Amino acid sequence: MLRLSKMADYGTVILAAMGEAPQRSRSAAEIADTIRVPAPTVSKILKILGRGGLVASHRGARGGYLLARPPGEITLADIIDVMDGPIGMTECSVTPGLCSQESSCAIRANWMRINRAVLGVLREITLDQMTAPVPQPVDTSALASKRAPTKKRK
């Protein structure tokens, strides 16, 4: 099963919360309260995000954390790469030369193609898009039952 790590998931949630007011500095404790994740976990993730260049920290009475870039410039690929390392469906799709069967593997090219597709989608989705409301499909079933019956042609 393909699944993000809990750290990458929390990293995305933290950045999304910060993206709602990108110019506002917040403490790790404030972010932890907002997203209901333990403060030590939030602090640990903020340090990783800081080393990865996605957040900036400021010390002092008005200190805290800010997004290092506008939310529209931070992609899911950026977040996952910082939290989990290079995005890859298989080891050989990220780092060539790790597998002894690489030169004769019949499916490596397809894994690489799939990897490029997944990476492409993750690079297109920004933090802004992640926090935008998802449009709900309109339920038209009630309308269908109230339509006037159609007359048959002779």
Image (cartoon, rainbow, N blue to C red):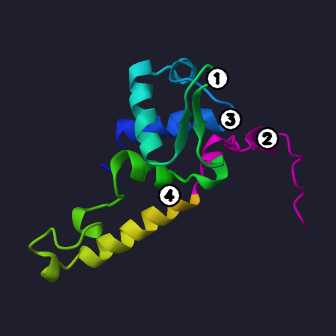
The boundaries of the magenta stretch are 125-154
Label 2 vs label 1, nearer the camera:
1
What is the secondary structure assignment of the residue under circle 2?
helix
Residue 20 position within the rendered picture, expressed as x and y whole percent measured from the top left? 68, 35
Q: Which mark is drawn over residue 20?
A: 3
Number of callouts in the render? 4
What is the secondary structure assignment of the residue under circle 3?
loop
Q: Is residue 38 visible?
A: no
How many residues crowd around disc 4 within 10 Å: few (fewer than 14), some, or many (20 or more)? some
**Residue 138, quarter of picture:** top right
Q: Nearer the viewer, residue 136 or 19?
A: 19
The residue to which callout 2 is attached is: 145
Label 3 vs label 1, nearer the camera:
1
* Callouts 3 and 1 close, C-beta under 8 Å: no
Q: CA distance from mark 2 to mark 1?
A: 59 Å
Q: Which mark is drawn over residue 122?
A: 4
Q: Which mark is drawn over residue 62?
A: 1
